[in-house]
Amino acid sequence: GIQVEQSPPDLILQEGANSTLRCNFSDSVNNLQWFHQNPWGQLINLFYIPSGTKQNGRLSATTVATERYSLLYISSSQTTDSGVYFCAVEPWKSSASKIIFGSGTRLSIRP
Amino acid sequence: NAGVTQTPKFRVLKTGQSMTLLCAQDMNHEYMYWYRQDPGMGLRLIHYSVGEGTTAKGEVPDGYNVSRLKKQNFLLGLESAAPSQTSVYFCASTAGYQPQHFGDGTRLSIL
């Protein structure tokens, strides 16, 4: 089956820094989602981005489907950005909109 | 609009006991899913449903059963709980080719 790899696995930054998180996938996909899991365990939808670039405030995401990767950019990090960021892909031949999760990037923002 | 609601939020069971986790969504979504999340890992699909009265196995279905008697509800059952089923369980729903929306999770411990 499709492999979803996220890097780096852990990232520690000072407040105000910028960061780039990467998601590589091994096969064609119908779509890709980025999630933020906050310290309370809630999964928050950030982006639904099968291709192209989207921006939402300090966050933006770019998916290059032909090269099988997606990037999540966080600018001017705040302590509330801490948590685990997951990408999840729906494989090209998947039925029922099933998605496969990567293992996540744990981001810690120091004040 | 509550979105996806999971009950209970926490539960402790003894080995061999049974229980049912309830997921309810008010978005009229056709597709619903149950995932488990183990420490340091992404989510893995247990079972899913493409509509009322239908269910199917996901990646890790052993030891679990599900039912979707009403479109808005998706139940996950553990017939004889085992310590290996200690995990955080998430329910999600989608209309298909749309983002998946997640509940807040159920933290389950099996002693």
Image (tube, coloured by chain):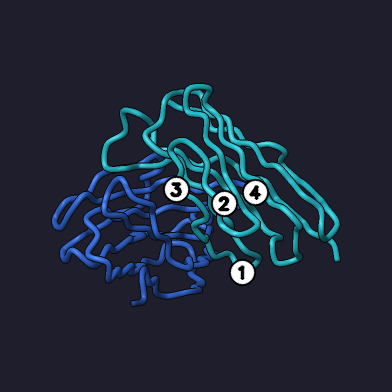
Chain colours: A cyan, B blue
Give the image location of residue B62, x and y in percent: 37, 45
N-terminal of the pair, mark 1 or mark 3, is 1
Q: Nearer the viewer, residue B108 or A24?
A: A24
Looking at the rendered image, the disc whose residue lies closer to the viewer, 2 or 3, is 3
- For label 4, the residue is B40
Q: Is mark 2 in CB contact (under 8 Å) with mark 4?
A: yes
Taking the spot 47% from the left edge, 53% from the top edge, the residue there is: B36
Q: Nearer the viewer, residue A71 or A25?
A: A71
Crowding at label 1, few (<14), some or many (≥20) Cα neighbours within 10 Å? few
Marks 1/3: CA distance? Answer: 22 Å
Relative to B99, A63 lies left or right: right
Tell me whether marks 1 and 4 sit on the same chain.
no
Gap in Å between the C-alphas at discs 3 and 4? Answer: 23 Å
Give amino acid for label 4.
Gly
Residue B80 occupies quadrant:
bottom left
The circle on residue A40 is: 1
Using the numbered discs, state the Cα–Cα distance from disc 1 to disc 2 in whole angstroms.
15 Å
- Same chain for the residues under marks 3 and 4 in the image: no
Give the residue type at disc 2.
Asp
Judging by the rendered image, the residue that carries numbered circle 3 is A48
Chain assignment, label 1 = A
Mark 1 and mark 2 residues within 8 Å of each other at the beta carbon: no
Residue at which label 2 appears:
B38
Nearer to us: label 1 or label 3: 3
Disc 4: which chain? B
B40 lies above or below A92: below
Q: Residues within 10 Å of mark 2 (few under 14, many from 20)?
A: some
Q: Are marks 1 and 4 in contact (CB under 8 Å)?
A: no
Amino acid type of the residue tagged 3 in the rendering: Tyr
